Image (tube, helix red, strand yellow):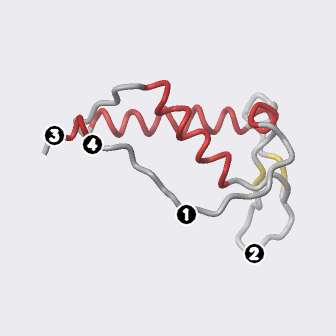
Amino acid sequence: MNIDRLPTYKIPNYVTSPRSMSFDEWLRTPVMDSGEPGDTTYRKCVCENGEWYTHQDFISNFLDDLVHIIHSSGYNIENKKQFKNEIATFVYRLSREKL
């Protein structure tokens, strides 16, 4: 099996949340955290420098970690830009805008 030529992974039936903001707007919004298990209040995540930890920060960090795992496992990504766009879109569609 040639792992460099695997077909694109497609998820035909996943649930998406209704959207009222664009992808670009969503990228600039802060990631929300519930804190302790069972806590029903959410708060914006903050970086060490005091700025909000945005969805763009999360996507960037997640992709860096994912690409590292893929490469260290001996796999290649043919179209890195397309891969990143698909992962970011997938996370966007599964995330909730309002908590």
Dot 4: what SS? Answer: loop
Q: Is residue 18 above or below residue 60?
A: below
Which amino acid does the dot numbered 4 rest on? Leu
Q: Callout 2: helix, strand or loop?
A: loop
Q: Which residue is mark 2?
A: 38
Cα–Cα span, label 4 and label 1: 21 Å
Q: Position of residue 52 (x, y in %)?
A: 80, 35
- Quadrant of the image containing the N terminus: top left
Residue highlighted by disc 1: 13
Mark 4: give few (<14), some (14-19) or many (20+) Cα within 10 Å.
few
Q: Nearer the viewer, mark 2 or mark 1?
A: 1
Q: Could you classify mark 2 by the number of other residues whose Cα lies within 10 Å: few (under 14), some (14-19), or many (20 or more)?
A: few
| Relative side of 1 to 96, left or right | left
SS class, disc 1: loop
Q: Percent from the top left, x then y, of residue 36?
A: 73, 66
* On screen, residue 90 above or below 15: above
Q: Earlier in the sequence, mark 3 or mark 2?
A: 3
Residue 88 falls in image quadrant:
top right
